[in-house]
Image: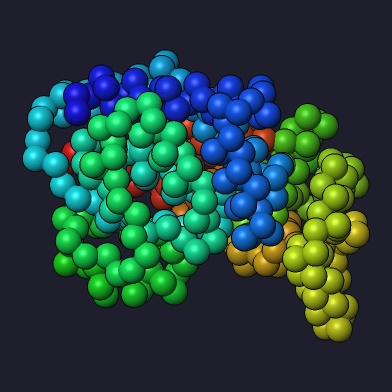
Amino acid sequence: MELNDRIESIIGLGELLRGYQKNPNNPQYKLIDEASRQAFVENPWFTPDHIQYALKAWGDSLQQNLLEQWLNPYLQDLLIQKKSKTVGLIMAGNIPVVGLHDFLTVLISGHRVCAKLSSSDQRLIPALTTMLINIQPGWKEQIEFINWKLNNFDTIIATGSNNTSRYFEYYFGKYPHIIRKGRNSIAVLTGEEDGFALRGLASDIMLYFGMGCRSVSKIYVPKGYDFSKLEQALVPFARYANHNKYFNNYTYYKTVLMLNNTPFIDNGFLSLVENSDLASPVSLLHYQYYNQVEEIIPQISRMKDSIQCIVSTLSMPFPTVLPGMAQTPALWDYADGKDTMKFLLS
């Protein structure tokens, strides 16, 4: 399949996703609508609003100008007809369609996909694949989903926890590979953020129940920081108290904090606790005070291999995004900072 055909079909998928957002009841979108409903039935963490948020983000991303901006640096290599490889994908399932970027990157690069879906996300990517094949039937020979052990692949891209990554390294280390571990995101606040920025930060913290690698799990705040404005910005997510699995986590960790006499801030659905650890469990947000921003730079630098994204309005010696932007990465914002397209074209 020619490069233009590959790109045009993916632009077409973006058009369908944008159309679905405007008119989800149109029979044309029955496939993705049913997949979304079934995904929630099978995995209650994939709530309808979170699925729709993820699909909307992808619809907004898969537009011609953005695809061109993403692919232009690789154009010369993409136009060279190389022997197609089979790329094994082991996908995560912590948030809806989290493996789609790797999936599309493999296809655009001209390779064949052999994908093992996460047990937590069995419906959405196959539905999007069917939509893609309906646009360009040539994709049918390029895509395979398997439920067993990966075999007969040339290259591997595997995403998992810090624990599973060790197994991936053991089994797949002899192949060309990208193996991703668990990561978290942080925010560095000044105390001067306005309501708009704090509402954006609230989404960065709470979207997908805080389970994404781009979800803010820890905030750095100046000494004497007033949490009341942030608490107010978090109010729209009070609905999480009605989600059984989330609220069970909240109740459990709040109880542990109380039994241990650990001071914490509570708003009825999220507990904020002073803790230097980067990762925080679902329903907890860690915070750490600083006197001067300069004093936390070495600590952040030491944790850089565990940090996916830094949210801040400050100018820092690390790449940052503004509050509200953590959960909507651009196509060229590669997970873990590893250029997947360059890897696949090498």
- Which quarter of the picture shows residue 232? top right
The number of numbered discs placed on residues in the rendered structure image is 0
**Outermost residue to the front:** 27
Q: Residue at 78% of width from left, 29% of height from top?
A: 196
Between 97 and 340, the one lying in front of the other is: 97
Determine if residue 207 is in view: no
Residue 247, position as x, y percentages in the image: 81, 65
Q: From the viewer's perspective, is 312 left or right of 330?
A: right
Work out which quarter of the rendered image holds the N terminus and state it.
Answer: top left
Rendering quarter of residue 167: bottom left
In the displayed structure, 76 sits above or below 261; it is above
Q: Position of residue 111 (x, y in %)?
A: 21, 41
Q: Residue furthest top?
A: 65
Q: Is residue 107 visible?
A: yes
Depth check, front residue: 314 or 65: 65
Identified at 60% across, 53% down, the residue is: 39
Q: What is the image's colouring?
A: rainbow
Which residue does the image show at 46% across and 46% down from the upper left?
125
Quadrant of the image for the C terminus?
top left
The residue at the far bottom in this view is: 259
Q: Residue 134, how many percent across, how many down?
A: 39, 30
Residue drawn at point x = 66 percent, y = 65 percent? 280
In the rendered structure, the answer to whether residue 200 lies left or right of residue 26 reads: right
The vertical placement of 176 against 35, above or below, is below
Pinpoint residue 50: horizontal percent, then vertical percent.
67, 44
Along the viewing direction, whichever of 55 and 221 lies nearer the viewer: 55
Most foreground residue, 77 or 107: 107
80 versus 271 height, above or below = above
Q: Is residue 145 found left or right of 233 in the rendered image?
A: left
